[in-house]
Image (tube, rainbow, N blue to C red):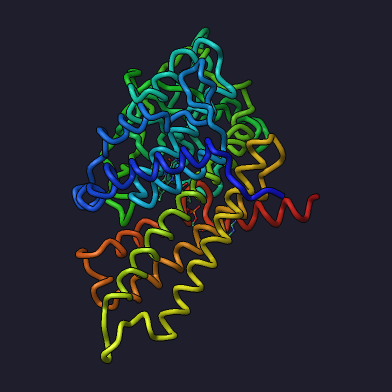
Amino acid sequence: MDFKLTIQQEMIRNAVRDFTEKEIKPVAGQYDEERRFPYQNIKKMAELGMMGMNIPVEYGGSDVGVVAYSLAITEIAKGCASHAVTTSVTNMVAEVIYEFGQEEIKRKHIPKLCNGEYAAGSFAITEPHAGSDAANIRTTAVREKDTYVINGTKSLITSGEASGVIVAWAVTNPNAKKGKGISAFVIEKETPGFIVESPEDKMGHRASPVNELVFDNCVVPANCLLGKEGEGFKIAMMELDGGRIGIGSLAVGVGFAAIDFATEYVKKREAFGKPISSFEAIQWMIADSYTELEAAQLLVLRAAFLKETRQAFTKEASMAKLFATEAARNVAIRAVQMLGGYGYTKGYPVERYLRDIIGTTLYEGTSEVQRIVISREILNR
Ligand SMILES: Cc1cc2nc3c(=O)[nH]c(=O)nc-3n(C[C@H](O)[C@H](O)[C@H](O)COP(=O)(O)OP(=O)(O)OC[C@H]3O[C@@H](n4cnc5c(N)ncnc54)[C@H](O)[C@@H]3O)c2cc1C
């Protein structure tokens, strides 16, 4: 077993780390406060190859592999979870179109996702009444000659207002068994009948808008179908496995950012005539936090390695996402505790890390859904 990164993986991690220090960290707090999508930074990140990291070069991607992708998302998230989730979801959208799209659709959209001409891509499954139970969606797509007519509403969709292209799921056969009559479609932002509603005002990830998307007799050409009719739910679940590696990587980054900041703070802050880092209670919080985050990163990188080497990784991706997001949430709570009352103020970034990390235990499958996936994989093997 080799734990060593390749030279290329180290170079990518270091380059993204530099970019995060110079371009992301200085603006993260302000963008969070103003709920502002970081258009300029996302464009620069696309130009550096961060938006199609598992896409072949001939489609505009950088094709550096899943391990390098995981390291990059972790580094971005050390600066800002919103930048990181935009990057993760946009990569996922490029990948699903690459894996299942028809050739002309791939050529049309993937280069624009990779080079930043599209500020983002969106992955739209959730509906107002169906989140965890994603097979229960009600949006419909009805075939009419060479088109599909889509009607319905998606909710909480990351980057909805910023995306040039959306992959959305709809029921094409209402009579099929649950999950068997759903299909996936590629929809361009300008398509008539596609409406983006105002963003939700949410606790964290505030520089990453989530919008309701409405399809009102939205007509798309038939070649926008991904895979075959009825295969959509399977496609969504496969892509979410990969997405969970991205979110696990993101959580590791937020967790490290929180404990790195708190560790520097406790070295300088004094109480009872000594730096608070000299108290055992504080030292144990540091020890537990770094131990849990390193364990989380090992799980995440193992899942990334399995995906990169084309081995089964469903269970491992869910374990990585579950453990990393919950570990990082515990770490962020400790980081606030280590800063005392100041940790609870906007003067320090740890409150943002805590607000951001809570979201990661909810989207791309809640922690409860990850436990369902993991136990099902174990019981059915
Ligand atoms: C910041 C953010 C970004 C998002 N981005 C996207 C996006 O880009 N695309 C998209 O499609 N969606 C997105 N979502 C939606 C997200 O995927 C859903 O919120 C999530 O799947 C949970 O669905 P729900 O909110 O409907 O909760 P529900 O499904 O109503 O669940 C509520 C609670 O019940 C629990 N629960 C439900 N079923 C079970 C069960 N069988 N066993 C045990 N517990 C259960 C859940 O774990 C949760 O704790 C985003 C959400 C957030 C917060």
Task: Kindly give the residue lying farthest to the top in the view shown.
Answer: 145
Is 369 positioned to the left or the right of 189 in the image?
right
x and y, in percent, of residue 183 in the image: 57, 27
Whether residue 157 is visible, yes or no, is no
Instruction: Decide: is 302 above or below 307.
Output: below
Marks counted in the figure total: 0
Q: Residue at x 41, y 80 (%)?
A: 282
Task: Kindly give the residue lying farthest to the front in the view shown.
Answer: 7
Instruction: Decide: is 261 above or below 22.
Output: below
Instruction: Decide: is 299 above or below 67.
Output: below
Q: Residue 291 versus residue 130: which sits nearer the camera?
A: 291
Whether residue 83 is visible, yes or no, is yes
Task: Kindly give the residue lying farthest to the bottom in the view shown.
Answer: 272
Q: Residue 90 versus residue 20: which sits nearer the camera?
A: 20
Q: Quadrant of residue 192?
A: top left
Is 326 positioned to the left or the right of 29 in the image?
right
Q: Residue 102 versus residue 110: which sits nearer the camera?
A: 110
Q: Quadrant of residue 267?
A: bottom left
Q: Residue at x 33, y 82 (%)?
A: 276
Q: Residue at x 50, y 34 (%)?
A: 92
Q: Quadrant of residue 368?
A: bottom right
Q: Residue 70 versus residue 3: which sits nearer the camera?
A: 3
x and y, in percent, of residue 157 in the image: 39, 39
Q: Residue at x 26, y 78 (%)?
A: 269
x and y, in percent, of residue 299 in the image: 61, 54
x and y, in percent, of residue 178 in the image: 64, 38
Instruction: Decide: is 10 above or below 116.
Output: below
